Image (spheres, rainbow, N blue to C red):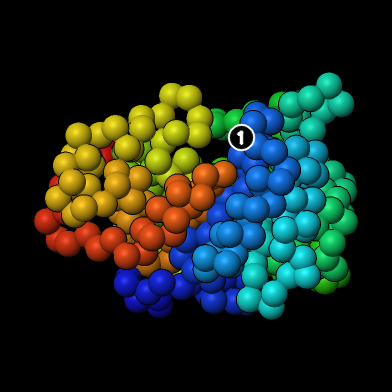
């Protein structure tokens, strides 16, 4: 078991820093230039991040291509995690792509755009509930059929490790026999609706990679950085509210790995410095009491 104060977690065959980098916003909204994106990716790697989270459906491959330009040839200690389960429609936007043959196509697209022969970690992004798009009709696919396809791709050497995203606790337990290395669900200090999934991860030693870690990536989520208690703890510790929200996640489960994203070098440094923020029993008790 990883010590609670450890700065690394073993994932996809490597020891990775517990704060990595989420690349989604580099192509989301079109407000980050390619040169800026490449620069911030390289800065993140130089600063110690060796876990980068992406998906081919982030910008129809554009995000993967930025990672390839910035980081290839990839160092041996680097983990690139990607996702399958959605695709970019011709007219723009995301559409479900949950069928097994579509998952295989997306794995191949990720391999090609990242320029690798094997993907380190592949999340099956289920679309059964919000946030995000919802699968309907023929896109309502049995989980076992999807896992069988991903297991075959792993056996063929195209995937090293299988992970899940946007699942409930029953789905995670159903998938356990296949071998699940990580779960990526919406979760933060103020919104703990998927706590039962986290508890299942605890039980089985599965890595936990929360998205929306500060409540700011999707509408309808309370912003952790605006909570009065979080702000008070931050002032007392000489930290930022973002760092307090992220530090709580790290302290809440020893196999939590964070993937905050930013195109701002100052925010990047702030995120990575969260590993230096220590929450004592008093701070943890106050923050724990903020659960809905």
> 141 or 292: which is nearer to us?
292
223 vs 167, left or right, is left
Q: Which residue lies under the disc numbered 1?
A: 128
Which residue is at 60% across, 76% downward? 14
Residue 282 pos. (x, y %): 12, 56
Q: Can residue 158 be seen in this view?
A: no
The answer to which image quadrant residue 241 occupies is top left
Which residue is at 32% across, 71% downward? 4
> 189 or 59: which is nearer to us?
59
> 114 or 33: which is nearer to us?
33
Residue 130 pos. (x, y %): 55, 30
The answer to which image quadrant residue 149 occupies is bottom right
Q: Residues within 10 Å of mark 1 (few under 14, many from 20)?
A: some
Q: In which quarter of the image is the C terminus?
A: top left
133 vs 169, left or right, is right
Q: In which quarter of the image is the N terminus?
A: bottom left
Which residue is at 84% across, 53% downward? 113
Residue 17 pos. (x, y %): 49, 69
**Residue 56 versus residue 19 in the image, above or below:** above
**Residue 218 versus residue 234 in the image, above or below:** above
Q: Can residue 270 be seen in this view?
A: yes
- Total residue callouts: 1
List the single residue furthest toward the left. Answer: 282
Residue 193 pos. (x, y %): 39, 39
Which residue is at 64% across, 60% downward? 42
85 vs 112, left or right, is left
**Residue 115 versus residue 145 in the image, above or below:** below
**Of helix, strand and loop, which one carries label 1?**
loop
């Amino acid at each position: 078991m990883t010590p609670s104060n450890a700065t690394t977690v073993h994932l996809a065959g490597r020891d990775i820093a517990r704060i990595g980098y989420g690349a989604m916003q580099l192509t989301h909204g079109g407000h980050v230039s390619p040169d800026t994106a490449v620069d911030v990716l390289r800065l993140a790697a130089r600063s110690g991040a060796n876990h980068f989270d992406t998906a081919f459906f982030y910008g129809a491959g554009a995000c993967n291509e930025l990672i390839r330009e910035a980081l290839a040839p990839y160092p041996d200690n680097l983990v690139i995690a990607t996702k399958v389960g959605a695709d970019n429609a011709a007219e723009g936007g995301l559409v479900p792509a949950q069928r097994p043959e579509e998952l295989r196509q997306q794995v191949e697209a990720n391999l090609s755009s990242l320029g690798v022969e094997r993907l380190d970690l592949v999340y099956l992004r289920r679309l059964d509930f919000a946030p995000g798009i919802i699968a309907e009709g023929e896109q309502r696919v049995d989980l076992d059929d999807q896992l069988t396809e991903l297991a075959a791709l792993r056996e063929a050497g195209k995937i090293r490790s299988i992970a899940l995203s946007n699942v409930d606790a029953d789905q995670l337990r159903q998938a356990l026999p296949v071998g699940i290395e990580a779960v990526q669900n919406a979760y933060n200090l103020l919104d703990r609706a998927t706590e039962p999934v986290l508890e299942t991860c605890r039980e089985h030693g599965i890595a936990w990679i929360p998205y929306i870690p500060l409540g700011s990536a999707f509408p309808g989520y309370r912003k952790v950085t605006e909570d009065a208690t979080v702000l008070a703890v931050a002032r007392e510790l000489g930290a930022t509210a973002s760092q307090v929200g992220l530090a709580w996640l790290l302290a809440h489960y020893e196999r939590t790995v964070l993937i905050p994203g930013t195109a701002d070098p100052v925010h990047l440094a702030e995120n990575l410095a969260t590993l230096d923020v220590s929450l004592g029993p008093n701070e943890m008790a106050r923050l724990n009491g903020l659960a809905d």
